[in-house]
Amino acid sequence: EDPKETSPSHPTPPPSSSSSSSPPPPIAELREEDPPLSDLRWIPHRSTAIRRAQQFLPPSEDDQPITLSVKCPWGDVIVAQRGDYVVSEQDRPDDRWVVSREIFDKTYEVVRYGDGEARTKFDEQQRLGKGRLFLCRKRALTYLVPLSDAVRAVGDAAADSGIEGRERGRDGENDSDGAYAAINDDPIEQRRVEVHTREGVVTVPVAGKYYHARGVDGEIWPYPTDKAQEMLEPVDE
């Protein structure tokens, strides 16, 4: 979503010579329906950023669905469906992500429509079809908690209730005895979590680089901490 979030480079790691050097599987999954997340202390923030956006409106041939794969700042690829919006930073067109049409209409507002020259350049970069380029602002509040707090809350709840399939051991099998028991000897920078956003599943590191974000409609996504410090300001409700 709002990043759902820097334009870090993402160099391709060298091929692994053995399976033992592969990163461990994600230690947990986060979903918006998780009951423990409602108990966390979510801090409301307002966005100060003006961003570019364009609706994905490809030409339709024989009523066949057409999608667009968008590489997000953290490396995952999310698929835009017809009608969804691709949002990017004004000065970093490669720092882009997908916002579903439903969420965009509820939470964003148009600031200004772009000129023809800017639109042509943007279209070449994004291949979005007939959607009109415009600048936008997120008018809805974004609620943040540290991502590690969200992972801990889900892990603790699973350990208490025996929920299966949410915490995983080193071999990827279910580990309902707690999210951390099987990975304590893994380097913390390798611990990752799957976040089930409405636009797709993304995998990000647990340690320090991301907040867990929630929108006014209950939607969740990972929000880079450096981008939050730059583009969000806390507010009182």
Image (cartoon, grey):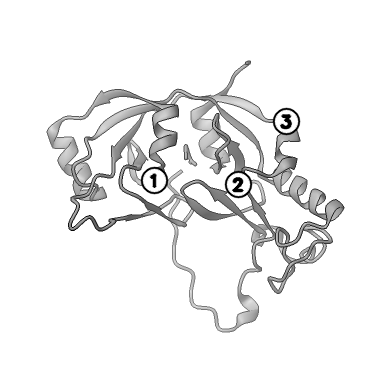
Q: 106 or 90: which is nearer to us? A: 106
Q: 187 or 148: which is nearer to us? A: 148
Q: Nearer the viewer, mark 2 or mark 3?
A: 3
Q: Is residue 18 left or right of residue 54?
A: right
Task: Looking at the image, tell me whether mark 2 or mark 3 is earlier in sequence order.
Answer: 3
Q: Of the numbered discs in the image, which one, if any, rests on residue 95? A: 1
Q: Is residue 216 left or right of residue 93?
A: right
**Residue 182 horizontal/vertical position (percent):** 79, 66
* Snapshot quadrant of residue 143: top right
Q: Which residue is mark 2?
A: 209
Do the residues bearing badges 1 and 2 touch, measured as CB atoms within 8 Å? Answer: no
Say above or below: 141 vs 96: above
Q: Residues within 10 Å of mark 1 (few under 14, many from 20)?
A: many
Image quadrant holding the C terminus, namely top right
Q: Which residue is mark 3?
A: 41
Say above or below: 70 vs 169: above
Q: Which residue sits furthest left?
A: 116
Do the residues bearing badges 2 and 3 touch, measured as CB atoms within 8 Å? Answer: no
Q: Which residue sits furthest right?
A: 160
Q: Residue at x 22, y 49 (%)?
A: 58
Labels in figure, total: 3
**Residue 137 horizontal/vertical position (percent):** 39, 26
The CA span between labels 1 and 2 is: 16 Å
Asked which secondary structure carries label 1, the reply is strand
Q: Nearer the viewer, mark 1 or mark 3?
A: 3
Q: Residue at x 62, y 43 (%)?
A: 32
Q: Residue at x 18, y 38 (%)?
A: 119
**Three-letter amino acid code at disc 1?**
Asp
**Three-letter amino acid code at disc 2?**
Lys
Q: Which residue sits furthest front?
A: 63
**Three-letter amino acid code at disc 3?**
Arg
Asked which secondary structure carries label 2, the reply is loop
